[in-house]
Amino acid sequence: MTAVGYVWVGALEHNADFQRDLLVRRGVDRVFEDISPNSTAQARPQLTEALDTVRPGDTLVVWRLDRLGSTTSTVLSLLELLGGRGVGVSSMADRLDTSGDDGRSVLAIVSAFTELERCLTRERTMVGVYAARARGRVGGRPRALSATNMERVVMLRDQGATVREIAQELGTSRATVYRVLEDAAAQGDDGSDGGGPSLTVRFTPPALPSDSLRLGEG
C-alpha cells in the first residue's frame, strides 16, 4: 500500500512549501503538485497523473479536501470514483479518511448523495447531449482526456455541473466534454453497463389498501 500526496496551490496563494512539508511529515511516498498561474484556470494535470498512479489499497493524501476540486460536486465525485477503485482519501485538516473499514461508512453516505443528485439532474444531462447533437456535433472517442477524466466528465455532469464548468475543471474544450457525454449516452442506449456497483437511492410510495378506494364505501 502506497501513500500518494497531492498539492494544489491557487493563484492567490504563496507557494507549495506548507502543504509539501505536511505531506512529507505524513510519510507519503510521492508528491504531485499543481500550481495555478491565474485565478481562472482550474486545470489540475498533476492530479490526473496522481489518479492514474494510485492503485487499490493506496491512499491519496491532501492537506484539505478543497485541494481536490473547485466545487463540492467535483470533490464528491472524486471521492466516489476513488472509493469504487478501492483507493482511500485522507484529508489532514478535515480529519477525514475513507480508507479501511471505517471509511466505508463515509463512502456509503457520499454514494447516496451523489446518486440522489444524479437522479435529480439526469434530465438536464440528456437535454445537453441532445442539444449538442442538434448542433451537428459528431460522436467519437476524444483523445484529449484520459480514461479517468472521461469518467469524471460523466459524474460531474450528472451532479449538475455545466459543460463550461467541467471543461474549465479538467482543462479541456467544451466540444470534448460534449463528445464524452454523447458517447456515454450512446452506451446507455445500447444497454451496456455504466460502471461498478453503486448505492442507489429509491423512493417508493406507500401502498394503499385496495378496498379503501371503492366508490360509495365510508
Image: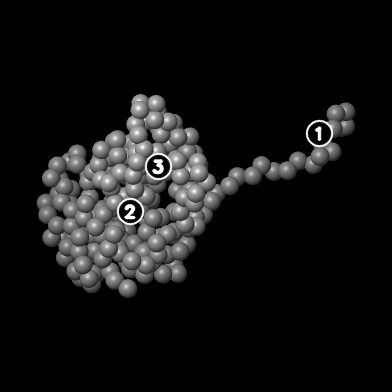
Residue for badge 3: 183
Q: Nearer the viewer, residue 121 or 72?
A: 121
Distance from Cα at disc 3 to Cα at disc 2: 15 Å
Residue for badge 2: 148
Quarter of the picture holding the C terminus? top right
Q: Residue furthest top?
A: 135
On the image, which quarter does residue 41 sit in? top left
The image's colouring method is one colour
Distance from Cα at disc 1 to Cα at disc 2: 53 Å
Secondary structure of the residue carrying numbered label 1: helix
Is residue 12 something one can see in this rendering? no
Distance from Cα at disc 3 to Cα at disc 1: 47 Å
CB-based contact (under 8 Å), mark 3 and mark 1: no
Q: Residue at x 35, y 26 (%)?
A: 135
Q: Is residue 202 above or below residue 86?
A: above
Q: Residue at x 20, y 64 (%)?
A: 31
Q: Position of residue 62 (x, y in %)?
A: 26, 60
Residue for badge 1: 213
Circle 2 residues within 10 Å: few <14, some 14–19, many ≥20: few
State left or right for residue 13 relative to residue 218. Answer: left
Residue type at tag 3: Asp
- Nearest to viewer (mark 3 / mark 1): 3
Q: Position of residue 169 (x, y in %)?
A: 27, 43
Q: Is residue 166 above or below residue 198?
A: above
